Image (cartoon, rainbow, N blue to C red):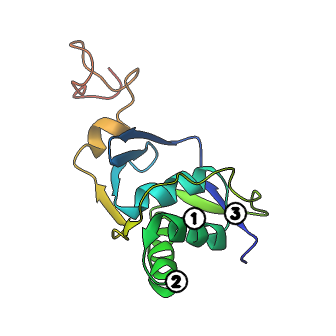
Amino acid sequence: MEDRGFCIASENVHHREFGDEIVVINTLAGCYYSLRGSAVDIWTLVEANVSRAMMAESLAARYEADREAIIAAVDHCLTQLFGHALIHETAGANGPLESIPVRPKQALPEPLVECFDDLRDLLLLDPVHEVSEAGWPHVSPDPAD
């Protein structure tokens, strides 16, 4: 299992970085997610299709924490990302990372993954078929209109 990689689950999962946060949107589920702390690093490593062991190695190079704490953070974050169907395993992982930024080590931040569904109706709205004459985001009272 250590040689398995991880990748973004589908073309319906989109993300964008905003400073120290990554916002991920799953257009099939109608939810969006805020990734902060070490979850930002882990998501970036998922994009690179690296193994769990390589994720732990990368975090160990960046953060001051014992190996058990780093592995626990990686496992916790991967479990959350799997649980929200944002990632899946791949048959093989990419090789060692090209470079790890050199900077003074900091304390390992908790991997924070928050799910929000307050915009679900808008994210799942079909803008071609389910809008009123006023246009998006006004829902047609009768979808057949």
Q: Where is residue 41 in the image (x, y as percent from the top left)?
A: 47, 57
Please give the name of the residue rendered at 33% of the width and 48% of the height, measured from the top-left corner.
Answer: 21
Residue labelled with disc 1:
58
The residues bearing labels 1 and 3 have C-alpha atoms spaced at a distance of 14 Å
Which one is nearer the viewer's eye here, 49 or 9? Answer: 49
Three-letter residue code for mark 2: Arg
Discs 1/3, front = 1
Mark 3 — residue? 5
Is mark 1 in CB contact (under 8 Å) with mark 3? no
Q: List x then y, in percent, for residue 56.
A: 57, 72
The amino acid at mark 3 is Gly
**Residue plotted at (36% across, 25% down):** 144
Q: Is residue 13 above or below residue 91?
A: above
Towards the viewer: 47 or 90: 47
Q: Name the residue under label 2.
A: 67
**In this view of the protein, can residue 82 be seen by the observer?**
no
